[in-house]
Image (tube, helix red, strand yellow):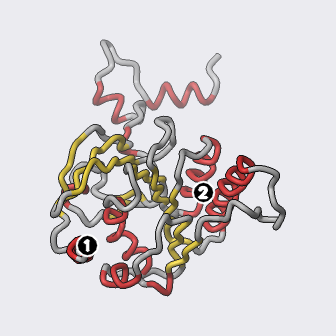
Amino acid sequence: MHTSDEAQNSQALPKPKGPVSLESLLNHGQLWRGKGQHTQGFHSTGFSELDAVLPHGGWPQDAIIELISPAPGLGDMALVLPELARLSQQEGVVACIAPPWLLHGPMLEESGVCLERLLCVPAFSASTNRAGSTPANKSNRGKDSLQSQQWAAEQIIKSGGCNGLLYWQAKPLPFIHYRRLQMLCGQFHCPVFMFHQSAPLNSPSSVRLQIIKRTENHLHIQVLKVRGAWGQQALNINMQNTPYHRYQLANTSSH
């Protein structure tokens, strides 16, 4: 005897006389399609070369995006500036967790970032934990500092007033923390840009980019992972006529 669910399925997909065609399976919703994933939207990265290789033409708005570079300040921040400016123009805040250097206000402002909506949380001191006590050794201090940053990142997203999060880490996070962040991204529709010198290959990020090198006018990157499209593409992104490029030239000429 057929159950009601079996009866409905048999009616939804009629029995073919021969092999089932791909078109028939697609028409009756019997196949999962990678680009049909649920999402809260995408927005242009501000760089046409990068938009062209992302499956929906921009950054996902409810996922983790990883940017890997051998050293902070190699150009990874430049890739996020257009999106940072857009997010900071909305009601709410954009948070920065543990940036490795002081953020340059004039350059951010010229890039369109609303500084009044930028929340910066410096790296936690390794000498004192959240409760104010002093850990017994250096290993415990480092572990507590990392856990404090993880805690802060999750609480900021949970507040519901965060439009986006920029999160710097000197080493890869525990996988369970990646999973919690990804769940919060989807729940609160908050993109998280994570800056690494290295990152675990099994992280649940939707996009992973690696900065190869920076020249005077271009940023050379490798697309390591893109959910819903092929990765492993090399791109040369034109950085001319951007505030980042002008300030970089001024900084270079001053030395």
Distance from Cα at disc 1 to Cα at disc 2:
43 Å
Mark 1 burial class by Cα count in 10 Å: few <14, some 14-19, many 20+: few
In the image, which disc is placed on residue 255?
A: 1
Q: In which quadrant will I find the C terminus?
A: bottom left
Q: Position of residue 242 (x, y in %)?
A: 22, 74
Along the viewing direction, whichever of 71 and 29 lies nearer the viewer: 71
Q: Position of residue 30 (x, y in %)?
A: 42, 31
Is 114 located above or below residue 200 in the figure? below
Do the numbered discs 1 and 2 sit on residues whose CB atoms are within 8 Å?
no
Determine whether the residue tagged by mark 1 lies in a helix, strand or loop. Answer: loop
Residue flagged by tag 1: what amino acid is it?
His
Determine whether the residue tagged by mark 2 lies in a helix, strand or loop. Answer: helix
Query: Which residue: 54% across, 31% down?
Result: 8
**On the rendered structure, is 138 left or right of 36?**
right
Q: In which quadrant will I find the N terminus?
A: top right
Query: Which residue: 20% across, 49% down?
Result: 235
Residue flagged by tag 2: what amino acid is it?
Leu
Along the viewing direction, whichever of 201 and 251 lies nearer the viewer: 251
Residue 90 location, quadrant: bottom left
Is 161 located above or below residue 79 in the figure? below
Nearer the observer: mark 1 or 2; the answer is 1
Is 10 located above or below residue 234 in the figure? above
Furthest-bottom residue in view? 116
Along the viewing direction, whichever of 121 and 57 lies nearer the viewer: 121
In the image, which disc is placed on residue 184?
A: 2
Query: Which residue: 77% across, 50% down?
Result: 137
Q: Position of residue 102 (x, y in %)?
A: 47, 74
Furthest-front residue in view? 255
The numbered mark, 1 or 2, whose residue comes first in the sequence reads 2
